[in-house]
Image (tube, rainbow, N blue to C red):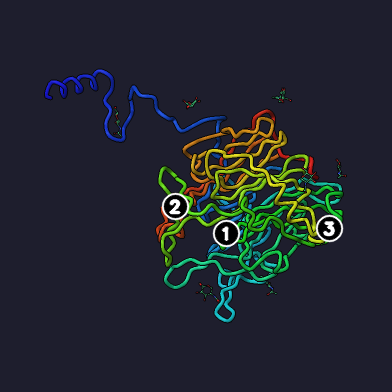
Amino acid sequence: MKFLYVLSLLAATAFAQVSYQNHTGTILRVDNGTFGPEIEEYHYYYDQWPIGLSVSSKGRLFVCYTRGDYTFTLGEAVNQTAEVPYPSAGLNLPPDMLNTTWNGIPFGSANSTAFISVQALYITPATSSRPETLWVLDTGRPTVHNAAGDPSMPYAQPGGPKLVGVSLDNDTIYTTYTFPVDVHYPDSYMNDVRFDLRSNVTNGGAGVAYIVDSSNEGRPGFIMLDLGTGESWRRLTQDRSVLRVPNDVPSYFGQPFYFRQLGQPIQWQQEGLDGIQITPDGKTVYYSPLTSKTLYSIPTANLLERDSNPLAEIWAKANVSSKGQRGGDANGFEGDSNGLIYQLMPEQNAIYYFDPAIGQTRTFVRDPRILWPDSASIAADGYFYMNINQLPDQADWNFGVDSRVYPGAVLRAKLPNNGTKISTLG
Ligand SMILES: *[C@@H]1O[C@H](CO)[C@@H](O)[C@H](O)[C@H]1NC(C)=O
Ligand SMILES: *[C@@H]1O[C@H](CO)[C@@H](O)[C@H](O)[C@H]1NC(C)=O
Ligand SMILES: *[C@@H]1O[C@H](CO)[C@@H](O)[C@H](O)[C@H]1NC(C)=O
Ligand SMILES: *[C@@H]1O[C@H](CO)[C@@H](O)[C@H](O)[C@H]1NC(C)=O
Ligand SMILES: *[C@@H]1O[C@H](CO)[C@@H](O)[C@H](O)[C@H]1NC(C)=O
Ligand SMILES: *[C@@H]1O[C@H](CO)[C@@H](O)[C@H](O)[C@H]1NC(C)=O
Ligand SMILES: *[C@@H]1O[C@H](CO)[C@@H](O)[C@H](O)[C@H]1NC(C)=O
Ligand SMILES: *[C@@H]1O[C@H](CO)[C@@H](O)[C@H](O)[C@H]1NC(C)=O
Ligand SMILES: *[C@@H]1O[C@H](CO)[C@@H](O)[C@H](O)[C@H]1NC(C)=O
């Protein structure tokens, strides 16, 4: 016994002094936590925690923040450490006007001209008929707190949930689309959006928006919007491929994650359809729920088919393809000119990509600083920009205890093989 002890002490001394939680000098192979191209720290958030971002052709960085009590929900970075309201502070509905109550039922504001709670941004390049446009997706559903601090999300009223187009030439809103209540349900939550602006893609002649409804209440699906006529319609509502995976327990930052919301018993993450990306030829949409390990795709032809075709939904369901598992749950998506489908992987502190040419998912970058990549934007400079916001540590998911640490960040990395922003759908 004593002999063995002395021997092991000698061995430890001979190789390295290694103690609990300090492996400096170990002789063992260590996971260095990183992979892929160099990552740059591009912007720091010290005030409001961000959700979505988009980078313009001139390198302008736009950011959105869901509300709550934040004073503004859409901003532009003015230097490396600060953002200001965009296009103007006055467009933000004041926090005390974000929600209302009718017959005891909580509703978000129906104001269609003011911003309520912006979840996602996407910039489309200039076309012959349209300036370079910052598209702003307002859910109309803020997260509000009662006197005890319990969070909740009121239902949407028509008018509140909207898609707003801002011209980046003159920094002015030039178009706004709202949704009827049989397309955007009171319990819908518009999480992200992609565009095909080619004139021949729909009858309206001005292109189409593909929106994901992630509805925590359980009715997720796709919402399509004809930008020419303003008509909208749904597809794949509650299809198995868009529903949350029940009782999913992912691991974030090395800890199994349960949803711990004040005023409620411990639950699981409830979010359905979240990630969306369209291919550079406009023919396919890739997608997945937040709580799933599986990547799916659907031909856009099936999403574009209107309800006037009684077989539209049946055909769509029959044309859903599973691309198999990808190695973890995924948050938002992005896509580059090479047709790679990037997926934000909060469990792995990584960005993965699905390569349709090989039918497999691979790692793009991995880094211990990628603490919940929430949204990504590929810019014309060939960089992949991502928002890092430590979301699983926010108070509303942890019984009121906020253990996020400032600053949040935008990180960026150069895309492989000269990949850049998709420019074929203008
Ligand atoms: C970790 O161990 C190394 C020697 O192996 C020592 O130099 C260093 O101070 C230790 N670090 C901490 C944080 O204890
Ligand atoms: C970290 O490990 C990965 C995977 O083994 C390797 O490719 C990379 O070169 C390592 N990075 C550093 C900085 O050692
Ligand atoms: C960044 O911009 C903010 C807001 O305009 C300003 O208060 C701050 O001083 C600026 N910081 C630097 C380093 O320029
Ligand atoms: C919407 O909000 C804006 C900004 O607060 C306000 O100017 C406008 O009057 C509101 N519209 C309606 C219909 O209440
Ligand atoms: C907004 O929601 C909060 C939290 O549920 C509630 O306390 C408040 O009364 C609501 N405001 C209105 C005007 O209904
Ligand atoms: C800004 O640009 C848009 C889109 O080209 C245009 O419709 C609008 O009239 C312009 N607004 C101003 C104030 O110049
Ligand atoms: C739509 O127009 C694009 C060029 O803008 C062309 O490549 C494509 O084939 C057209 N699609 C259809 C269905 O006609
Ligand atoms: C399935 O999608 C393909 C395009 O990939 C299309 O040609 C076909 O008509 C679709 N099938 C149905 C039943 O909608
Ligand atoms: C990327 O672009 C550069 C400059 O145009 C070119 O030299 C290089 O071959 C390209 N690389 C790939 C992988 O296409």
**In what quadrant does ligand 4 lie?**
bottom right
Give the labeled residue for mark 2: 393
Give the labeled residue for mark 1: 66
User: Circle 3: is it few (<14), some (14-19), or many (20+) Cα within 10 Å?
Assistant: some
Q: Are marks 3 and 1 in contact (CB under 8 Å)?
A: no
Q: Earlier in the sequence, mark 1 or mark 2?
A: 1
For this orientation, the residue located farthest to the top is: 14
User: Circle 2: is it few (<14), some (14-19), or many (20+) Cα within 10 Å?
Assistant: some
38 to 240, vertically: above or below: above
Q: How far from the left and from the top, in percent, is residue 392? A: 47, 51
What element does badge 3 sit on? loop
Q: How far from the left and from the top, in percent, is residue 381? A: 69, 36
Q: Amino acid at mark 1?
A: Thr
Depth check, front residue: 246 or 40: 246
Which label number is shown at residue 228?
3
Specify whether 342 is left or right of 372.
Answer: right
Q: Quadrant of residue 67?
A: bottom right
Q: How far from the left and from the top, in percent, is residue 417? A: 68, 28
Q: Are marks 3 and 2 in contact (CB under 8 Å)?
A: no
Q: Amino acid at mark 3?
A: Gly
Q: How far from the left and from the top, in percent, is residue 272? A: 58, 54
Specify whether 268 is left or right of 50.
Answer: left
What element does badge 2 sit on? helix
Q: Earlier in the sequence, mark 3 or mark 2?
A: 3
